[in-house]
Image: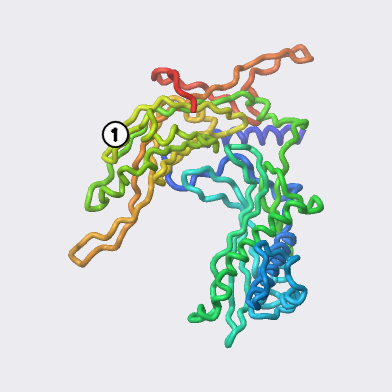
Amino acid sequence: MWASHARGLVACLAMVLASNAFAQEDVLGPPDALQFPTQASADAPNGVTGPFLRKTIEDTVDVALCEALMRNDGRPIPADFTAANCDPAYAAKVRNREGSVHWASASARPLQCGGNCVGRPFMTQSQRVGEPNLREAMLYGHIDLTLDGPVDRSLTYFFEAHIPCKASNGAKTGNVDVRFEIGDPVVGSPGVVESILDFLLLPARLSDRIDAGIRAMLSSVPGTSQEVGACRSVGVGLSTGNPQFDNVVFDKPVSAGGRRPLADLLLRGDRVKVEFLSITRHPLPGPPLVAPEHAQPGNPAAGYFTAYLNGVPVGFPVPLNMSPEALQLPPEGGTIALNYCKTLPIDGWDRLQVIFGNGLGGAVWSQFPRAQGFGQGVPRRMTTGRGIVVPGLPGPNGTTKPQSVTLREFELLYRITFLPAPAFEAVSEGGGRRPPRGSVTGELGERPPLVSDGAPGPVACREI
């Protein structure tokens, strides 16, 4: 009885959340993360453990330190230096914190530092503008070394670790990807650059070693606790005690032979068609604020346009200003009619995200929930934006400071049509009839109705 009530509450909550969904239109900045891959729960069964990541960082830094010491002593260095190329005498120096550059202390090593040098993982998303974004686990950390000289200097490298379930082209599943970004060194005291000329390449070596080392180790890790590979979600599992045991977790894709989620079964065959109707190039704000050259007249990149529909790239025929179907969009303005469209499956998706970008760097995005028919019906508009910096202007108190200006430049007119799969009825074993497709509300809510606003229906268009 309680379980039945609980399922009813969950269904009601799902319907409330769906009814509260709202559209986001003509938005600048990084688009929201795509719906898929999803965020894993903290107890997801697969993961990359904290100790493993820390040991990999530590081992690869040790290799970079060994290479630096051997290079400084004039020893031959192979192009692809690995731990196997580290002379045992130099490996001992690294372990014992000897030589001209070494770990700042034993407790500076990631396996010893607790939360002092490696932060706790958290969930965020990538921040690309004009392209789809994915959820990712992320953590910050730093590597503390000491550079010996007349006076010892500290040498610190700050790093970021990004771990998404990396999927491409709107796929619902992907692969766990571990990527490290290493910053430039921070030297403890000024005026010592001349004394570390031999180590100026160390940051690049550290970055290369860590990234390559992690990828190599993840490709053949024993044990399910360290298993890395195909995924449909990514998340974090924080330890209640030592932060060293924090994990980045994920779920594997559901096998083809397993049961498909109810949402997939009910929505199989749903599609949307997006028609691209026209592009308008708006005139830029006039001088003296924005000079005409900011329009970049004659730049071939102005003829490149790309859309993304739930992560699926849709490239307009390019270069538009060089093809027989050239779209002549002069810098001072103009509108070109289009007759392109893209139809794609939308099974299981609860939203449609449309990103529109131009080769000059401008981009814009909109997003529509399933409960609103994915934004179908009336034609819609979105206008790219790109930032420029304009010089200061003379004033009574001197020249003003340079300022940033956003150019709202290319406007796309488009229309969305929702194409739900046909409803069906089937006789059940008990003699009754199964409900029509889309009538089950426990997980998905009612199927949104087709919208008709009296506008002309879709015309034949060229699929791209």
Quarter of the image for the N terminus: give it: top right
In the displayed orientation, state which residue is furthest to the left.
Answer: 396
Residue found 41% across the figure and 21% down from its top: 453
Q: Quadrant of residue 82?
A: bottom right
Decide: is 400 above or below 299.
below
Outermost residue on the bottom side: it is: 150
Mark 1 lies on a secondary structure that is strand
Is residue 424 shown to the viewer in this render? yes
How many circles with numbers are drawn on the protein?
1
Task: Residue 68 in the image: state x and y as whole percent.
Answer: 64, 73
Residue 119 sits in quarter: bottom right
How packed is label 1: few (under 14 Cα within 10 Å), some, or many (20 or more)? some
For the question of whether residue 366 can be seen, the reply is no
Q: Is residue 142 above or below residue 214?
A: below
119 vs 335, nearest the viewer: 335
In the image, is 164 to the left or to the right of 352? right
Q: Nearer the viewer, residue 322 or 317?
A: 322
Where residue 267 appears, x then y in whole percent?
A: 63, 26
Residue at the location (39% across, 20% down)?
Answer: 455
Image vertical order of residue 287 relative to residue 377, above or below: below
The residue most toward the right is 223
Left or right: where does residue 325 sit relative to residue 241? left
* Nearer-the-camera pick, 138 or 178: 178
Q: Amino acid at mark 1?
A: Gly
Quickly name the residue at label 1: 334
Q: Position of residue 321 (x, y in %)?
A: 36, 35
Residue 10: x and y in percent read 66, 36
**Color theme of the render:** rainbow
Q: Quadrant of residue 232?
A: top right
